[in-house]
Image (tube, rainbow, N blue to C red):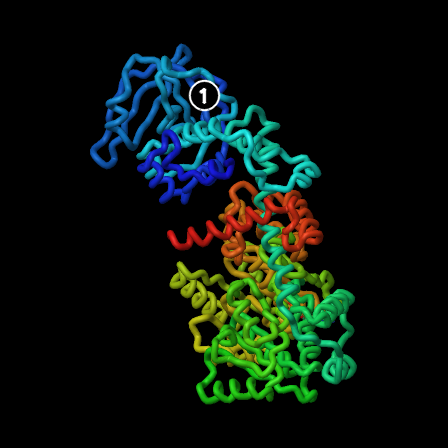
Amino acid sequence: MAQDFFDTPIEYLKGVGPKKAEILQKELRIFTCEGLIRHYPFRYVDRSKFYKVREVNESLPYVQLRGFITNLQTIGEKRSQRMTTTFRDETGILELVWFKGINWVKKSLEANKEYIIFGKPTEFNGRINIVHPELEAANEFSGTMSAMQPVYNSSEKMKLHFLDSKGISKIQKTIISQLPTVINETLPDKLIVDLKLGGLRETLINIHQPSNPDSLKKAEFRLKFEELFYLQLELLKMKVHRKEVNKGVLFPKIGEYFNSFYQQKLPFDLTNAQKRVLKEIRADMGTGKQMNRLLQGDVGSGKTLVALMSMLIALDNGYQACLMAPTELLVTQHFATLNKMLEGLGIKIALLTGSNKTKKRREILEQLISGEIHIVVGTHALIEESVQFKNLGLVVIDEQHRFGVEQRSRLWHKSDVFPHVMVMTATPIPRTLAMTLYGDLDTSIIDELPPGRTPVTTVHRFDSNRLRVFGFMKEQIKEGRQVYVVYPLIEESEKMDYKDLMDGFESISRAFPMPEYQVSIVHGRMKPEARDFEMQRFIKGETQIMVATTVIEVGVDVPNASVMVIESAERFGLSQLHQLRGRVGRGAKQSYCILMSSFKLSSDARTRIETMVRTTDGFEIAEIDMQLRGPGDLAGTQQSGILNLRLADITKDSIILNLARKAAQNILEQDPHLTSPENKCLADVLNKKRRTNTNWSKIS
Ligand code: ADP
Ligand code: MG
């Protein structure tokens, strides 16, 4: 019976009716009482205190006043019309302003009548005013306004139908007054007791009508926990399911390929972190279950090498491997690296990209099916239906966040037995984000850079110092080093950016004249062949300066390059800056990163630049990046459910997230299918979620 109440369509609720119900469905996708009660306030305001006009200033948040209205007047014509009135109490006057709904205001306001008003004070032309105040006749005021009055999100359309914050608040009161005394819990009792959470009923009441800050805090904690807990439960259940169902190819042995590479070809010792991670991967691939592993590591930590050696294990067991990366440039470079490192081992490696000619392409496809090709490196082109393998055993995806989860899974389905999957991130991602974005994967972290690297020295220089920067570049070039100069290229303003790039190229060509200097340029508008040609000249050391857009952001590896100049650095995101800086400091020589900017910097831009100057730790940079941008702006979050969270925020609630993950893990360890009676409520909620999700997709 309790559940019946939650499932009640909202139009049957007193005070809603068909019209309002329709608006709530359209605007907020709220269909049932449960949907409505889960529409939490986004803020609370203090309506218990009355201010005097004299006390009001712009720095106050929301204020409530009692006083009289005089002097209503309409100013301006038609569209730019606004209405103002004077509001007075015994201590002074301020102005109330309306830009919308003027006719309504005119009709309903009475001069010289006492009102209670509520709103945000602002200052305009030296006078305090309140725009669009909430307002109520003092004689109708009930006088029981709470110190924590809820404020609800609402849209213009909703406001037109009396579904503003106040209107929603009224409906919530109705629901709460009708709440059955017993409602079905959404968390197991044990969890509620162990974590000292509030019960669902009291929590829902307290989130809408908190009686004090502590009860609000407790309600928020429980609801945040619940959201994060279910997110983790779903991810971990996926993982459990996959481990049970997805048989993986068994790689029982290490053989010729791996051993000869390790003994004869590997030009350096593996770092301890690389060794540890390889062990984890080997163990995974030896279980007969499908591996799904996220490989995290800072720029330059040697992820590619780990990928390569994992692929050799696949080959040793008679399987093929593929390596997928997001750009042609990166793919081409991986192809070259593999060819160089595996030379002489009798391994056939192919390159498959969108620009393959038909004949060549057909040949590659045939050799993939016949098994003649051992390793294929490619872009999205690898995902296409027409690409089939004889026996694909391992898929490595580099710089994952440019691929969607869905694309990932298409690769799994290229054979009857699922190939092992290893995903490598371009730059580190914060732990909390990894936990939600890749929460269904196992994680390996390379937390150590190869020895002999000197950390890159990073400085910030204003544009006005460009000549000195050029001077420094000349010194470095004289010592035989090479230099990158990178320009931002951001789609919306592409034309402008393109012009900046070309102007920059010209001024560099003038400052570094031929034949003493050779300058390359690489950008997205060039034909791939031309781009390749210029890239190759730089890699071979024929040119000393590479002027480029962010196409060189990922993966490019030229150890002799020791200076990275980033133009308009204030326009780059932190992880992009870190990625770019990772292009230098690859040899033993001291390297430099010079961040150029104008004088005018937003506070975020300043933080980004200061962070880059202060630290080279990619994990720390990733944290700060997420704090600055919020998870919604980070790549990949769209598909992760992070954005459906109502109260929880993974950038701020990491403690709760950890608790939630642990709790979900414990429960699934003991009851992987959630069949025990005490976990029935979990299974019920998951089922319901699944049902309503499909409903939604049909409706929209
Ligand atoms: P990323 O993790 O950014 O993909 P790479 O795999 O491109 O890093 O490695 C960066 C550079 O470090 C490459 O030139 C690679 O050959 C080199 N490298 C990798 N592992 C080691 C190691 N154990 N010792 C020395 N150099 C290494
Ligand atoms: Mg890499």
* Residue type indicated by callout 1: Val
Q: Which residue is mark 1?
A: 56
Q: Quadrant of residue 580?
A: bottom right
Question: Residue 365 or 115: which is nearer the viewer?
Answer: 365
Classify residue 166 as left or right of residue 382: left
Query: Image height check: is 10 above or below 411?
Result: above
Extreme left residue here? Answer: 77
Q: Residue at x 41, y 30 (%)?
A: 171
Helix, strand, or loop for circle 1? Answer: loop
Which quadrant of the figure shows ligand 2?
A: bottom right
The answer to which image quadrant residue 500 occupies is bottom left
Q: Is residue 4 left or right of residue 232?
A: left
The residue positioned farthest toward the top in the image shown: 90
Judge by depth and name the residue closer to the eye, 635 or 618.
635
At x 59%, y 79%, the residue is: 335
Residue 341: x, y in percent?
68, 81
Mark 1: give few (<14), some (14-19) or many (20+) Cα within 10 Å.
many
The answer to whether residue 448 of the structure is visible from this angle is: yes
Residue 39 seen in render: no
Left or right relative to 393: residue 605: left
Q: Measured along the vertical axis of the image, is residue 590 above or below residue 177?
A: below
